[in-house]
Image (tube, grey):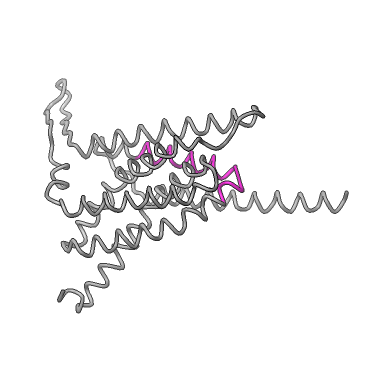
Amino acid sequence: MEIFFELETYIALITLTFLEIILGVDNIIFISIVSNKVDKEFRQRIRTIGLFLAMILRIIMLLGLTWFIGLTEPIFESTDVFNTGINVSVSWKDIILAAGGIFLILKSSMEITHKIDSNFDTNSTKSLQVSSLYTVVWQIVAIDFIFSVDSILTAIGLTEQVLLMIIAVVISIIVMMVYASKISNIIERYPSLEILALSFLILIGFNLIVEAAHYSIPKGYIYFALFFTLGVEYINIIFRNVSKKKIKIKD
């Protein structure tokens, strides 16, 4: 416990926690959208259970760092593929990222399609049956596992103290639990933000596939695009609200 008497420990902890929260932005968006598909009375419970299980999973992964780091070891290598001079290396990490990217793209595309169809179907219902709640929970856990690959590898690069990583994970999950409900409410109130968020998840899915192919797109670009488009949409929301007020005054 001597590490808790060192200034570097707290600097590392703050940095780790901040990175975990930043890298969890896309996770919060996915959780908010998925949890909004169930009845309001179950939403907070679903988010809490899903994130709690996700936290346990991350802690187990951190305690088994040797196994986790092994996911980055190549399970298939090939040099000079088809005499093109291209070398191919595939690890379990690449497979997980690619599978996660495909899942995000398909899931987000299906949600956008459902959103469009529901606007034309007056008999459609938004909420899922209770029997489907477990499906939502496991979707939250599965997507958190996929997003954990990058965040944990980043944490390993910053510190060797597993205890600090676990504390940072617990804090970041608590932040997600608090803000997921608020983001869910905002997305439900402004449907256009849901389409924007789903489009962002498609972009994240594409980025995961590209990363699995050993190409790197700086996440700063992606987050800048997200916050820029959110800013534009926020201005549009204000404009629409002002226009509605003007119409009501005229009437």
For image coordinates 27% across by 67% down, the residue present is: 13
Please state if 71 lies on the left or on the right of 20 as rendered: left
Give the answer, above or below, for where 121 lies relative to 212.
above
Give the answer, above or below, for where 54 lies relative to 19.
above
Q: Position of residue 203 (x, y in %)?
A: 42, 39
Give the answer, above or below, for where 29 lies relative to 116.
below
Furthest residue toward front: 131
Q: Position of residue 40 (x, y in %)?
A: 55, 47
For image coordinates 38% across by 60% down, the residue present is: 174
Number of callouts: 0
Q: Position of residue 201 (x, y in %)?
A: 43, 41
Please state if 213 lies on the left or on the right of 119 as rendered: left
Given residues 136 and 80, the one toward you in this image is: 136
Magenta: main secondary structure equals helix
Image quadrant occupied by the N terminus: bottom left
Furthest residue toward top: 82
Instruction: Place residue 164 in its image quadrant.
Output: bottom left
Instruction: Place residue 138 in its image quadrant.
Output: top left
Please state if 21 lies on the left or on the right of 165 as rendered: right
Q: Is residue 201 magenta?
A: yes
Give the answer, above or below, for where 235 lies relative to 90.
below
Q: Is residue 15 magenta?
A: no
Furthest residue toward bottom: 5
- Magenta range is 186-207
